[in-house]
Amino acid sequence: MRLVRAAVLTTLAIVAAACQKKSASDTILIGHVGSLTGAEASFGTSTENGIRLAVEEINARGGIKGKRVVVKTYDDQGKPEEAAVAATRLITQDKVTVLLGEVASSRSLAMAPIADANQVPQITPTSTNPRVTKDGDKTRPYVFRVCFIDPFQGTVMAKFARENLKLERVAILRDVGSDYSVGLADYFKKKFEELGGTIVNDQSFKGGDQDFKAQLTTIKGKKPELIYVPGYYTDVALVARQARELGIKVPLGGGDGWDSAKLYEIAQGALDGSFFSNHYTHENPDPLIQNFVKRYREKFGGTPDSMAALGYDAAQVAFAAMARATDLSGPAVRDAIATTRNFPGVGGTITIDSDHNAVKSAVVLGIEKNKARFIATVNP
Amino acid sequence: MTEFLQHLVNGLSVGTIYALVALGYTMVYGVLKLINFAHGDVYMVGAFAGYYLSELVGVRPPWADPPPGAGEVFVKATIVTMGAMIICGLLGYVIERFAYRPLRHRARLTALITAIGVSFLLEFGFQLSPLVHTPIEFPPGPSPRVFPALLERVGYEWAGVSLSNYDIIGLLVALGLMLGLQFIVYRTRFGTAMRAVSFDSEVAGLMGIPVNRIISWTFILGSALAAAAAVISAVSRPRIEPLFGLMAGLKAFVAAVLGGIGSVPGAMVGGLVLGLAEEYVAGYTDSSYRDAIAFTVLILVLLIRPAGLFGRFTVEKV
C-alpha cells in the first residue's frame, strides 16, 4: 500500500514538474483585473474584449520571442479592495509578466502599490487620475498608462464649454466617492474660471445613489447653461433622467466615464444635446482605427467603445515592450515600456513621458438621438 | 419659493418609499420585539421580483411600437406589483419560519444576529453569477439592471414645480396601504389577535390565539409592503442591484424609530419627515451631508425622545 502511494506521489510530482516546465518555456502569462460585473460592468467587459483581440492577433503572428501569450483575468466587481486582492493573486500565485488594468482610477490606485512592490509592470488602459502613476511626488517606477490624464481631460471640456459653446454659467455635480470624478471636476472648475466663466453651483452625490433630485433642484434654481457631471455611466444616466423630469433643459457635460452602451439604454434620450470628452471615436476614418473596429465587430459584435480601444492599446504596448526587452523579468520589461515612443495605438499615438503618462489628443463627442457623434478633436 | 416647493415634492416622493419600508419594520418589531434587519433586503428582492415578472409577462415600454394600450398597461402593472408582493410575502414567511421561529425562545440578541445573517445571505446570494438562464437569469449577479417602465411617466408643471404621476400614485398607494393596515390592526379579529400577541404572546396563546400563524402573517404583510415600495421606487428610479436595499433598509429603520417603532402612523410620518429632512439638507447645504443627517436624526431622537414621535401616545403597540 505504502509503495503504491509513493509511486502515485512520485508520478504526480513528475507530472507537476513537467507541466511547470512546459508553461515556463512555451507561454507568457499576462494578467488582467477588470470590473466584469458591478455598476461599471461594461468597462471591464469592453477592456477584456480589447485585450483578447490583441492577444489573438499577437499569437496569430507567432507570439512574442517564440512564446504564446495567455491572458488570465480576474473580476473585481467594481470594488477597489477586490482589485487589490486580484492584483496580488495574479502577481504572487499566477506569476504574470505584465499586469493590465484597471479602468477606474480608484481601483488602479489600489493596485499600483502592489505592482510597484513586486516589481511587475502595470499598464492601466484608461485610468486618468494623475495620482495613479504617482507615489507622492515621485513617479511609481512600475506603473504606466496609455491614456491622457485628468488635468488635460478637465481642461478639454472647460475649453470646449467656454470657447466653442460660449457658455458663462456652469454647475458641477460630482461623485465624491470617486477619485476620478473629484479630480476631473476640480480641473474643469479651475480651467473654466481661468477662462472667465462662473461655476454657479458645485454639488455632490455618491456613486450608487438612487435620487439626485435634491441637488438638481438647487442647481436648477441657479440657472446654469450646462451641468458638468463627471461620473460613471449608470449614475450619469439616472442624473440625466431626473434632470429632465425636473424640467432642466440645459445640456450635461462629462468625461470618458460616460462611454458605455448602457448609458443610452438607461438614459432613454435624456442625454440628447449633451457632450463628453473621450479617448477616441470609432467614426475616425483612419485605416488603423477602421481595421480595429471591423475586426472587433467580427469577433464580438457591437461597436468598440474607448475602453475596448484602450484595452487593446495597453495590451499592444505591453507586447511591443516584451518583444524589445532583453529578457522577460519585471525590470527589463519595465525599462522597455518606459521607452515606448510614437507607438501607433487605435486610441492615438502613444509616447510614454517621464511621468509614465501618454500624451495624446482627446475628442469631444455630442449625443444626438441617443447616440454619440464626433464633434471635435482637442490637442494637448 | 419654487425651489422650496420642488424640494417638498421630491422629499415626499423619497419619504413615501421610506414610509412603506418602515411599516414592515414597525409591524415586526411591534409583535416580536425583533429588529428584522433583513427587511431592507426583502425590499431589494421585491424589486427583482417585479423585474423578473415584467420580463415574464412581457411588459412593453411606453415608447414601444405600437405603444401598449391603457388596459394592457393597467393589467400588467397590477400583475407585476401584486406578484412581487406575493413573492415577497412568501419570502417573509420562509424567513420567519426557518430563520427566526426556531430561535424565538432564545436570547433576543441571537435573533438579531440571525437577522443580519439573513440579510447577508440575500445580499450576497443575489450577487452570485446566474445559475439558471431560462426563463429568467437567476441569481441576477452584481451588475445593475434597468427596471422596465410599467407605465408612462406623465409630468405636470405648476408654477415651475414639476411633479409626475409616479409621485402621486406612489403617495396615494402608500396612504392607502397605511390606512388598510390601520384598519386591519384595529378593526379586524386578526388585528385584535396581533395586538394580543404583541401584548403578551404566552397569555395570548393560552387564550386560544394561534400565535405562530399570527406572527407568520405579520411577516407576510410587512414583506408584501416592502415589495410594493420597491416596485413604486424602481419605476421612477430604474436602476436595481443586489445591494440597493441596504441603504433603503437602514433609512427606513431610522424612519421607524423616528416615528416611534411599533406605531403604524408613526412609521408613515417618520418616513415622510426623514425624506423631507434629507431633501432640504441636501438641497440647501452640502449634499454630501445627506446620509449623515439621516443618522444624526436617529441619534437625536434616541437622546431626546427615545419612544419616537408617536411612541408615547400609542398605548397598544402593533
Image: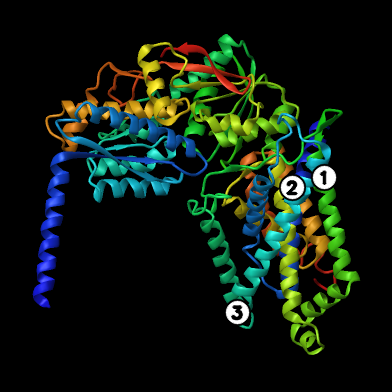
Q: Place residue B301 in its image quadrant.
A: bottom right
Pick the quarter of the image with the C terminus of chain B. Answer: bottom right
- Label 1 – label 3 distance at C-alpha: 39 Å
Q: Residues within 10 Å of mark 3 (few under 14, many from 20)?
A: some
Amino acid on which the number 1 mark rests in the picture: Ile
The disc numbered 1 marks a residue on which chain? B
Residue carrying label 2: B232
Q: Callout 1: helix, strand or loop?
A: helix
Vertical position of residue A270 compared to residue A193: above or below: below
Residue carrying label 3: B103
Check if mark 2 and mark 3 are on a common chain.
yes
User: Is A348 or B29 nearer to us in this picture?
Assistant: A348
Q: Are marks 1 and 2 in contact (CB under 8 Å)?
A: yes
Residue B277 visible in the displayed image? no
Residue carrying label 1: B169
- Label 1 – label 2 distance at C-alpha: 8 Å
